[in-house]
Image: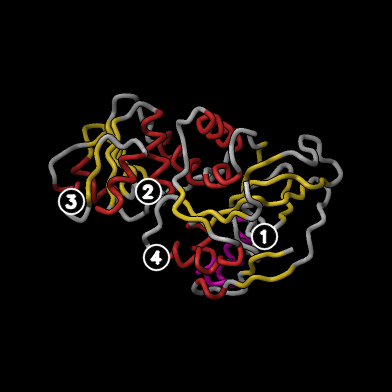
């Protein structure tokens, strides 16, 4: 099978396309033919990290060095190992490869039926593999942080970094929870952020929201560049600050809820671009550019 290999830390150019043996599912595993994968900020960070350091962290945290990148996927089960009970060949599934050595930037991936760190659910037939793969880690992260902030209907929610993957989902989930949403992004992304449902948009290049005298019930840092002390003067009485530096996890029930929101049309991934598996270096260059909007997808089998 064709797969992306990440042999060492470095820029996008370290990534290689190689032919690997197609996995054989072990007991409790599923062999998934990947129809669509993605390139996330997590994939980029793993590519950049020192492998020795990452291996040490992995031993402590319980995850493996990723030889094949790609955390998010959507595809169809080709075969199952012994002991699998909840899935069968032919089932369309979506999920993550978190904690595994071999990720989804490949034509096939073997994943456990009961993952310890990742998630897997059956994909709704009404959703494309592209929209399933692209709406996985980002919306789960946004949902958990908004729940941590205890966002309530009628409150004001400011999303800093609103045009990125997590930010774009935070806008839509904020509206789902009944908040008035203010997006902060560059001038070139204001139209995009407005199209996602933001009630108003602040161009950070021309206005500093921390100095405009306004107060917000929840400030959501979707890019990990702010601290509570930096925004304390912009929080209303009883206001809360949350950001992506906080630890989040992947929860099957949350992904199922996200899928229901997608089916209702309340949550949609914004696709920055589509890149073939052979163009994985270009995809990572785009992710590294700082100009990525929403999500990057890697379609492997056309929808």
Tag 1 residue: 106
The percent position of residue 216, horizontal first and vertical second, equals 24, 36
Query: In the shown orientation, is residue 293 left or right of residue 70?
Result: left
Mark 4 and mark 1: span between their CA atoms? 23 Å
Q: CB under 8 Å between callouts 4 and 3?
A: no
The secondary structure type at the circle numbered 1 is loop
The prevailing secondary structure element of the residues shown in magenta is helix
Q: Which residue carries the number 2 mark?
A: 222
Gap in Å between the C-alphas at discs 1 and 2? 28 Å
**Crowding near the residue tagged with mark 3, few <14, some 14–19, many ≥20 C-alpha atoms within 10 Å:** few
Mark 4 residue element: loop
Please state which of the two labelled residues, at mark 1 or mark 2, is closer to the viewer: 1
**Residue that carries the numbered disc 4 in the rendered image:** 289
- In this rendering, the answer to whether 210 lies above or below 235 is below
Mark closer to the observer (4, 2): 4
Earlier sequence position, callout 1 versus callout 3: 1
The residue where tag 3 is placed is: 208
Q: Which numbered disc flags the more N-terminal residue, 4 or 1?
A: 1
């Amino acid at each position: 099978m064709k797969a992306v290999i990440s042999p060492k830390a470095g820029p996008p150019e370290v990534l290689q396309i190689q032919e690997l043996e197609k996995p054989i599912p072990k007991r409790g595993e599923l062999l998934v033919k990947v129809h669509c994968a993605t390139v996330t900020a997590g994939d980029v960070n793993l590519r950049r990290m020192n492998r020795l350091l990452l291996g040490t962290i992995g031993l402590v945290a319980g995850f493996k060095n990723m030889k094949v990148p790609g955390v998010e996927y959507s595809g169809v089960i080709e075969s199952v190992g012994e002991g699998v009970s909840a899935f069968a060949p032919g089932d369309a599934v979506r999920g993550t490869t978190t904690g595994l050595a071999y990720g989804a930037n490949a034509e096939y991936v073997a994943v456990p039926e009961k993952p310890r760190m990742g998630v897997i659910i059956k994909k709704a037939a009404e959703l494309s593999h592209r929209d399933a793969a692209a709406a996985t880690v980002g919306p789960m992260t946004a949902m958990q942080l908004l729940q941590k902030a205890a966002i309530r209907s009628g409150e004001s929610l400011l999303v800093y970094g609103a045009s990125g993957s997590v930010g774009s989902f935070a806008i839509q989930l904020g509206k789902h929870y009944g908040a008035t949403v203010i997006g902060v992004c560059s001038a070139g992304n204001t139209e995009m952020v407005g199209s996602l449902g933001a009630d108003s948009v602040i161009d950070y290049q021309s206005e500093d929201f921390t100095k405009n005298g306004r107060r917000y019930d929840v400030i959501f840092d979707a890019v990990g560049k702010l601290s509570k002390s930096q925004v304390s003067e912009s929080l209303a009485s009883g206001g809360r600050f949350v950001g992506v530096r906080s630890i989040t996890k992947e929860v099957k029930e949350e992904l199922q809820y996200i899928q229901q929101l997608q089916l209702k049309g309340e949550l949609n991934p914004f696709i920055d671009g589509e890149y073939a598996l052979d163009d994985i270096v270009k995809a990572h260059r785009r992710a590294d550019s700082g100009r990525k909007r929403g999500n990057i997808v890697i379609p492997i089998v056309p929808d």
